[in-house]
Amino acid sequence: YGQWKDTGIRLEGDAVQSLTVTFLEMWNAVSDKDANDSDFGKYIFHYDYKAQQTGFIQPYADSPMDNEQVGEEVYISMINKAEKYCWFMTPYLIITDEMTHALCLAAKRGVDVRIITPGIPDKKFIYNITRSFYHGLVKHGVRVYEWTPGFCHAKMSVVDDCMATCGTINLDYRSLYHHFENGCFMIDCQSVLDIKSDLIKTMGECRDVTEQYCTGRSAYLRLGQLFMRLFAGLL
């Protein structure tokens, strides 16, 4: 895989309780016991904590067992609110029509939309499907970068120096629809700018493939990618 890039954040204070409850709810979902353990109080610890940063952090979770696509809705909401730029890093890019429309519409209204994907795949079949989405995005103004040192497993986004996310949610069907996932939405805190700085540094190590996929592909390649897209909803 070459180099492996990943990211994480450290939470302190009340936000930790939200992630604790998220874990316990997922534990109940996969538990072999007939009854759920609904007494979360014994796992929640209260202690005095003085915030070290300004702004707000909201952990959130997504479950395939309800009718809410929280992960996708957070991403689309951020895209729709973007005025200057909207940048993403994701290991896989297998997105719905709704997500594609939001990204393209943002780019067409003048927002700087960029997506970073791996330069070296972990699964070649999935990688080819990821690349099959490039042309539909770049022809509307989205810029796509591939991280040449290796495989970027990080899932991050940042918008207009004020909003960011970091978590487990890829831009693919499995994360957005089929998996238990979680993330943290951040607004007006220093971590937003830290994420932006990391993405800028990462883009400096990327190849810009926007023009390559904007000018078209061979008929053989297009046919192969259209066939692979038939399986996109399972990936």
Image (cartoon, rainbow, N blue to C red):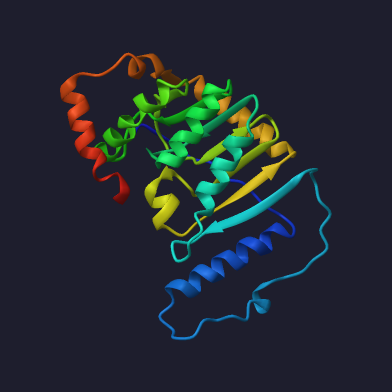
Q: Residue 22: horizontal and vertical position, in percent? A: 57, 64
Q: Nearer the viewer, residue 158 or 147?
A: 158
- Point 15% across, 24% down: residue: 220
Q: Residue 202: horizontal and vertical position, in percent? A: 51, 26
Q: Residue 92: horizontal and vertical position, in percent? A: 38, 39
- Let me know if residue 199 appears in the view: yes
Q: Nearer the viewer, residue 37 or 130?
A: 130
- Is residue 137 positioned above or below 234 on the image? above
- Point 45% across, 66% down: residue: 65
- Point 80% across, 43% down: residue: 54
The image quadrant of residue 200 is top right
- Is residue 34 positioned above or below 98 on the image? below
Work out which residue is located at the far left of the displayed protein and give it. Answer: 220
Q: Nearer the viewer, residue 147 or 60?
A: 60
- Is residue 69 positioned above or below 221 on the image? below
Work out which residue is located at the far bottom of the displayed protein and give it. Answer: 34
- Point 34% across, 15% down: residue: 212
Q: Residue 155: horizontal and vertical position, in percent? A: 50, 41
Tell me if 132 is positioned left or right of 31 in this view: left
The image quadrant of residue 12 is bottom right
- Let me know if residue 153 appears in the view: no
Which quarter of the rendered picture does the N terminus lie within? top left
Tell me if 32 is positioned left or right of 193 in this view: left
